[in-house]
């Protein structure tokens, strides 16, 4: 009798699990609801140069995806500006799509072309963004003196790149 109860409980749990899986396996038509800009070719490039600093980590991060597939991973290239050595990897579409959406939501394409110019001995940042045929380049002479939404984009790019699957990783 005890064994029969256990079997019944296990069957009920299994059936509930199967029903939940079937209900949850309905994949929404992502293309129907997705931002159409996510299907366009796009690129985000962030270049950081530490002025007045010898042997600092001057580098460029380039995140790029071709047109067509919003589920495709983005290519990531990190270039050391002193040696020109490059590191290549892939960033999941999840992170890349969120970066593109963040760039748009913060109005990067409508921002000024320059901020905090005229500084010496500071962190110089140049950001280039392209989404389809829309392009924007923003130059700064001091990363710490830019509007918070722009600074947030800088930080978001760094945060997303932390999830890159590098080709040379062991």
Image (tube, rainbow, N blue to C red):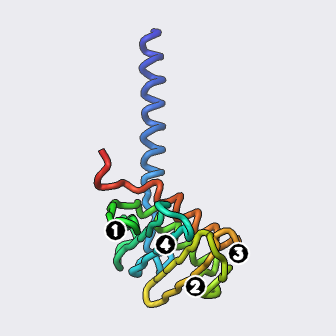
Q: Is residue 152 above or below residue 41?
A: above
Number of the label disc, if any, that sits on residue 84: 1
Q: Regarding mark 2 in the picture, which secondary structure is present there?
A: helix
- Element under disc 1: loop
**Number of the front mark, 2 or 3:** 3
Nearest the eye: 55 or 46: 55
Query: Which residue does the numbered mark 3 point to in the structure image?
Result: 147
Q: Quadrant of the N terminus?
A: top left
Q: Earlier in the sequence, mark 2 or mark 3?
A: 2
Q: Alpha carbon of mark 2 to alpha carbon of mark 3: how far?
A: 14 Å
Above or below: residue 92 compared with residue 132: above
On the rendered structure, is 161 left or right of 52?
Answer: left
Closer to viewer: mark 1 or mark 4: 1
* Sequence-first tag of 1 and 4: 4
Q: CA distance from mark 1 to mark 2?
A: 29 Å
Which mark sits nearer the N-terminus, 3 or 4?
4
Q: Position of residue 2 (x, y in %)?
A: 47, 9
In percent of the image, x 45 and y 17: which residue is there?
6
Residue 54 appears at what percent x and percent y?
49, 63
Pointer 1 and pointer 4: residues touching (CB < 8 Å)?
no
Mark 3 vs mark 4, CA separation in Å: 17 Å
> According to the image, label 2 marks what residue?
109
Q: Position of residue 121 (x, y in %)?
A: 62, 70
Check residue 47 in the rendering and tell me which mark sits there, or answer none: 4
Q: Is residue 144 left or right of residue 60?
A: right
The span from disc 1 to disc 3 (Cα, nearest Å) is: 30 Å
């Amino acid at each position: 009798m005890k064994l029969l109860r256990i079997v019944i409980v296990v069957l009920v749990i299994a059936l509930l699990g199967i029903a939940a899986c079937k209900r949850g396996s309905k994949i929404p038509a992502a293309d129907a609801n997705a931002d159409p800009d996510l299907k366009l070719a796009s690129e985000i490039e962030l270049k950081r140069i530490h002025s007045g600093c010898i042997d600092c980590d001057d580098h460029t991060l380039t995140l790029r995806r071709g047109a067509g597939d919003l589920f495709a991973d983005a290519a990531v290239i990190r270039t050391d500006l002193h040696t020109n050595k490059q590191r290549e990897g892939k960033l999941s579409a999840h992170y890349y799509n969120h970066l593109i959406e963040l760039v748009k939501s913060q109005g990067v394409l409508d921002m000024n072309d320059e901020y905090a110019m005229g500084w010496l001995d500071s962190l110089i940042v140049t950001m280039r963004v392209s989404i389809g045929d829309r392009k924007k380049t923003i130059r700064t002479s001091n990363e710490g003196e830019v509007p918070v939404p722009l600074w947030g984009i800088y930080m978001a790019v760094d945060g997303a790149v932390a999830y890159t699957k590098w080709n040379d990783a062991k």
